[in-house]
Amino acid sequence: MEIQKFTELMDLAERLKDTPRHSWTSRGRRESVAEHSWRLALMGIFMKDEFPEIQMEKLLKMCILHDMGEAFTGDIPAFEKTKQDSLTEEQALSSWIETLPSPYKEEFGDLYQEMNCLETLEARVCKALDKMEALIQHNEADLSTWLPLEYELQLSYGEKEVQFSEYMKTLKKEVNQISLDKIHKSKRRR
């Protein structure tokens, strides 16, 4: 890859380090999209035992790149994101992919198509873990950062995405229990 194109890509990637998400960290600051993607990739690494047939390199690429479109649009919380928002993000991402040199243009185009179709194990694991990472981060944040609608959303978000795997359903159940414990603990303090 030409050095100039490489540095342009790194400038774009840096935007994700500076793009805040709706989520808060345990120390009371907004999480960045890059931080979310990094931990999602870390979660992916630990799926090898549960899914020994998984193509780990592909999964990690999906985890790292899944929110690249937010470098153009910013993060829009799931409960606010419209179909038009998703379309705008997809179009920006597709336009960016077209500027990549080969073989990256073809590889990333195929990768995003695979993630959108959710037909492969890697795509389903990435999608489920993406939801679980957001819920886990939410549980780690102070309850004062939760919006009223998030008490219900915390328990239902990601439910559909985990259905392909007993392991993922068990993970979702555990994350839900942590959420409920956090809510009940807060009510007892009042």
Image: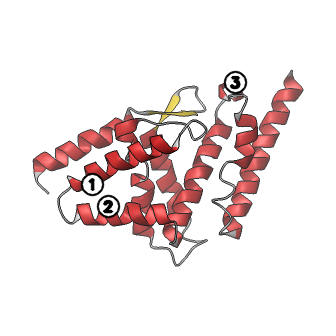
Numbered disc in front, either 2 or 3: 2
Residue 14 position in % (x across, y down): 31, 38
**Distance from the alpha carbon under mark 2 to that under mark 3:** 39 Å
- Relative horizontal placement of residue 127, taking residue 148 as reference (left or right): left
Which mark, by number, is residue 147?
A: none
Instruction: Determine the residue positioned at 17% across, 59% down.
Output: 101
Residue ID for mark 3: 144
Q: Is residue 37 above or below residue 77?
A: below
Sequence order check, earlier mark of 3 and 1: 1
Residue found at the very far right of the displayed protein: 188
Say left or right for 166 vs 180: left
Check the picture and name the quadrant holding the C terminus: top right
What's under tag 3, amino acid-wise?
A: Ser
Closer to the N terminus: mark 2 or mark 3?
2
The image shows residue 7 at horizontal and vertical percentages of 18, 44
Q: Residue at position x 41%, y 33% from top?
A: 19
Q: Are marks 3 and 1 in contact (CB under 8 Å)?
A: no
Report the residue marked by disc 2: 108
Q: Which mark is residue 97?
A: 1
Q: Is residue 16 visible?
A: no
Amino acid on which the number 2 mark rests in the picture: Phe
Residue depicted at x 18% and y 64%: 102
Mark 1 vs mark 2, CA separation in Å: 7 Å
Q: Amino acid at mark 1?
A: Ile
Whichever of callouts 1 and 2 sits on the residue coming sooner in the sequence is 1
Q: Identify the element where label 1 is drawn.
A: helix
Residues 27 and 106: in front is 106
User: Closer to the camera: disc 3 or disc 1?
Assistant: 1
Circle 2: element type: helix
